[in-house]
Amino acid sequence: MAAPEKYDCIVVGAGPAGAMAAYHAAKGGCSVALIEKKEKAGTPVRCGEAVGFKGFSASLEIEDRWILSHIKRIRMVSPSGTTVDLINPSKIGNNYVIDREIMDDELVQRAVAAGVSYFPSTPVLSVRSGPRHYTCTTPADSLSASCVVLADGVESKLARDLGWDTALPMEDIETCAFCHVTHDAINEEAIEFHVGSNNAPGGFVWVFPRGGKKANVGLGILGTKHKSGRAEELLNQFIDRKFPHAKVDNLHCGGVPVGRWLRPLVKNGVLIVGDAARQVNSLTGGGIAYALFAGRIAGETIAHAKTVDGINYRRLKVYQKKWATYCGKQQMRSYALKSVLLKKDNDAFYNSIAQSLAKEDPQELNYMRVFMRTFARHPLILLKTFFLFR
Amino acid sequence: MLQIDKSKCDICGTCISICPENALELSDSLRIDQQKCILCNLCVDVCPFGALHISSNKDKKLQKEKNGSTREI
């Protein structure tokens, strides 16, 4: 039997985190295998697809062909229907709804163009560690590498096989149902967030336009507040209320991790990135910017760790250091805020905040003001999270 | 025992992320390792489409009595 093909690095999962890791490792001179269980990575799309320019562009230039909508207004809707609008671009930055199918595909193509060996339709059944190398077993074959990047998503299993405890507690997951809705009432330039127990207990409903009177409409319910099938039920109810007789298609579901980012991010020669590493904003459920960033620094770190004798495992720890410095604190902040918000998660609370914010000049509203108003009556909370803002 | 309604399962993997016993597996479809499953019900509760449920053992008991068999089913 032939010895397994040997690479510097194997990346499992070709979503944004994995594709970026593979690309940057290859650009830095490593031989890379990128293995993806699906025929096309990231299909069906399980994502709201909204991004802020600032976070995204820290890792990647946003291409015009990926953009479905330019967002001019962020609207929050309270349980009683009070709306709070954020409309000043100098306060809220530039926000877009992007086409993940196109973007994900292109990121993989770029990796391949950089020399990455790509294996779609290939599930990795197991990862075994050996002396200074790892062996990935697929149904047809075995591949081996000095190091491995696990980018296998929210449903990641391989990390558990390698000693990580990645099982999420129910208060650290949003269980989501989402679809495409086509309806005249959809505003092509506005994204909406609806909160309240009738909408999405412990989470929110999102309406993210994708052009032409079509929008991503979905909701997330906190695991502890969910009962079997409720996400789909509540989504249908929301659509019936807000978009009666709409055309609905592409109904899918999925989970969003809203816990703390996983520690450690590196174990010997294994790095973990993206949803698998729980690198997601706990308040918004946003993970694209984090995934791109983590993928990039993981790939760059691997390239820098390459020596004539193989990959220096100690140098791989730089990846976690960089993540902790640039993103870790912010992510922990989002987690602290989410925990606090969940204690207050009741309709009266949201209604009272919305009422006071609705009196303000929309041109002046920014995230900080919303935050301060939300937690104004809770000085202990502000104190608790203060140290995270330093 | 834990059972899947394949007509409802979207193969999203949410159940896998919360299973404390690593008893669920995704490939072309969702698979359950009944040996590992402790019937904690978390996956049933978390499933956005309600594709999982735990069947009662009452039916199996009745079946056993009817057959007059003492073998384990």
Image (cartoon, rainbow, N blue to C red):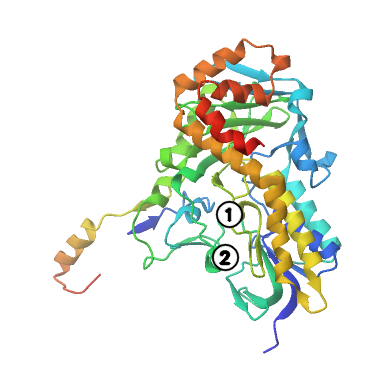
Q: Position of residue A34 (x, y in %)?
A: 73, 65
Q: Residues within 10 Å of mark 2 (few under 14, many from 20)?
A: many
Q: Residues within 10 Å of mark 1 (few under 14, many from 20)?
A: some
Residue at image position (79%, 24%) is: A90
Camera-side residue of A323 and A16: A323
Q: How much space separates mark 2 and mark 1, taking CA atoms? A: 14 Å
Disc 2 chain ID: A
Disc 1 marks which residue?
A262
Up/down of A75 relative to A321, above or below: above
Disc 2 marks which residue?
A158
Residue at image position (57%, 65%) is: A158
Secondary structure state at the residue bearing disc 2: helix
Q: Position of residue A374 (x, y in %)?
A: 56, 23
Disc 1 chain ID: A
Query: Which residue is outermost to the top?
Result: A359
- Establish whether labels 2 and 1 are both on one chain: yes
Residue at image position (57%, 70%) is: A125
Which of the marked residues, 2 or 1, is nearer the chain's N terminus?
2
Type of amino acid under label 2: Leu
Residue A235 seen anywhere in this rendered image of the structure:
no
Type of amino acid under label 1: Leu
Up/down of A96 relative to A348, above or below: below
Residue A156 seen anywhere in this rendered image of the structure:
yes
Camera-side residue of B59 and A328: A328
In what quadrant of the picture does the C terminus of chain A appear?
A: top right
Residue at image position (36%, 51%) is: B41
